[in-house]
Image: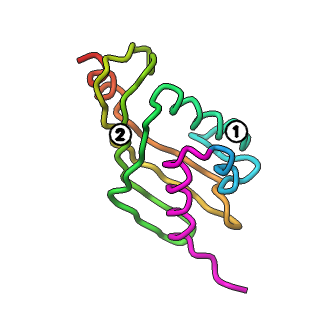
Amino acid sequence: MSEFDIRDFYQRYVDVINAHQWDRVGEFMDETVLFHGQTVTREQGIANFESLTEAILDLRWEVKDLVIAGDIIGTHAILRGTPVKEWLGVAPNGKPIEVHEITVYKVSDGKFVQMSNVWDIEAIRKQLST
C-alpha cells in the first residue's frame, strides 16, 4: 500500500477548484466537514464553492505559501477574478479583485475533515466599490 501524499492531494484539490469542477470537489471532502466550527455536509461545501463562481466566473486560486504539519495544511492563497453579479452585498463594478486568503485544513483518511479560512472582508468590499 502506498503512503498518502498530502502535498499531492492538496495540489490536485487546487487544480480541481481552479477548473471549477464542482462535481469532483466532493472527492476531497469527508461526508461532513467542520467548517468554521460548524458541521456542514459535503453537498453544502460544494454549494459554497459554486456560489463563489456564480458571482466571479473567472475566479482562480494561486497558492503562495503552503505549510504541512502531519495532517494539517496551512496556506496563503490569492484569489483573483472579476465579479459579474452582486457579492458580499456590493454590486460588481467591472474591475478585477484580489483576495488574500489564509486557510487551515485538517485531513483524515485522505479527505478534508476540517476547513477554515480568513479573508479581509472590508478590503474586498473596498475593491468592489472603488
Question: Residue drawn at (52%, 48%), measured in percent from left and top?
Answer: 19
The residue under label 1 is: 40
Whether residue 87 is situated above or below residue 109 in the rendered picture: above
Which of discs 1 and 2 lies nearer the camera? The answer is: 2
Q: Does the magenta segment cover residue 94?
A: no
Can you name the residue that lies furthest to the right here? 31
Whether residue 10 is situated above or below residue 21 in the rendered picture: below
Residue 27 in the figure: left or right of residue 70 = right
Could you tell me residue 23's position as x and y percent? 69, 45
Whether residue 60 is situated above or below residue 106 in the rendered picture: above
Q: Amino acid at mark 1?
A: Val
Could you tell me residue 33's position as x and y percent? 68, 47
The residue under label 2 is: 80
Give the total of numbered labels.
2
Question: Residue drawn at (67%, 51%), measured in percent from left and top?
Answer: 24
Question: Residue drawn at (33%, 28%), measured in percent from left and top?
Answer: 124
Q: Secondary structure at mark 2?
A: strand
Residue 49 in the figure: left or right of residue 24 = left
Whether residue 89 is situated above or below residue 45 in the rendered picture: above
Predominant secondary structure, magenta span:
helix
Residue 34 in the figure: left or right of residue 18 = right
Q: CA distance from mark 1 to mark 2?
A: 26 Å
Name the disc covering residue 110, or none. none
Q: Amino acid at mark 2?
A: Arg
Can you name the residue that lies furthest to the bottom here? 1
Could you tell me residue 80's position as x and y percent? 35, 39
The quadrant of the picture occupied by the N terminus is bottom right
Residue stretch rendered in magenta on the structure? 1-21
Q: Secondary structure at mark 1?
A: strand
